[in-house]
Image (cartoon, helix red, strand yellow):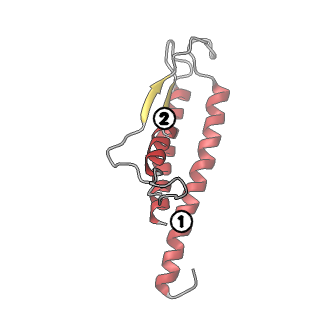
Amino acid sequence: MSGTVKLLENLLNYCTEKNKVIAKNLSNIGTENYQREDIMFKDILDQKVNSLLKTDNEKHISSLKAELPQDQKFEHIFDDSTEMDSGVNNVNIEKEMSDLAENTLRYKFASRKVGDYYKNIQNVIKGGSA
């Protein structure tokens, strides 16, 4: 389970960074020639998961230790699209608000799961049922 908690912690870190980027995009919606930013996490996760799932026998599944290296940062990318959605730059307020809602749900899910894990540990330590 600790591998899952590490993955959820990484997801929480991603959501925090994503929220900062969305806020930056929204705050610059009226800034002329501002280039929309985004961050990449899925590609990093896919690379790690795929590298950890290699096995000697195709009928076997290796254990998944879903942990990203501590020095691995999320990659900030710039949107090169030339569509001027806001009239002065390529920030689309509907997309940003949609991304914000999705990111909020993802963060709430991960934080609830991490909290539940630690509550179960606390119950076990106190002698209650998990």
Residue at 55% of width from left, 57% of height from top?
A: 59
Secondary structure under the numbered disc 1 in the rendered image: helix
- Amino acid carrying label 2: it is Met
Secondary structure under the numbered disc 2 in the rendered image: strand
Question: Is 93 located above or below residue 80 in the figure?
Answer: below
Residue at 54% of width from left, 75% of height from top?
A: 120
Q: In the shown orientation, is residue 69 left or right of residue 56?
A: left
**Dot 2 corresponds to which residue?**
40
**Residue 30 image position (x, y, % from top left):** 56, 18
Question: Is 36 located above or below residue 108 in the figure?
Answer: above
**Residue 31 image position (x, y, % from top left):** 51, 17
**Dot 1 corresponds to which residue?**
115
Q: How dense is the environment of label 1, judged by Cα within 10 Å: few (below 14), some, or many (20 and up)?
A: few
Residue at 52% of width from left, 58% of height from top?
A: 61
Residue at 48% of width from left, 39% of height from top?
A: 41
Inter-mark Cα distance, 2 to 1: 25 Å
Question: Is 18 located above or below residue 53 in the figure?
Answer: above
**Residue 58 image position (x, y, % from top left):** 53, 53
Farthest left residue in view: 71
Farthest bottom residue in view: 127
Q: Nearer the viewer, residue 62 or 75?
A: 62
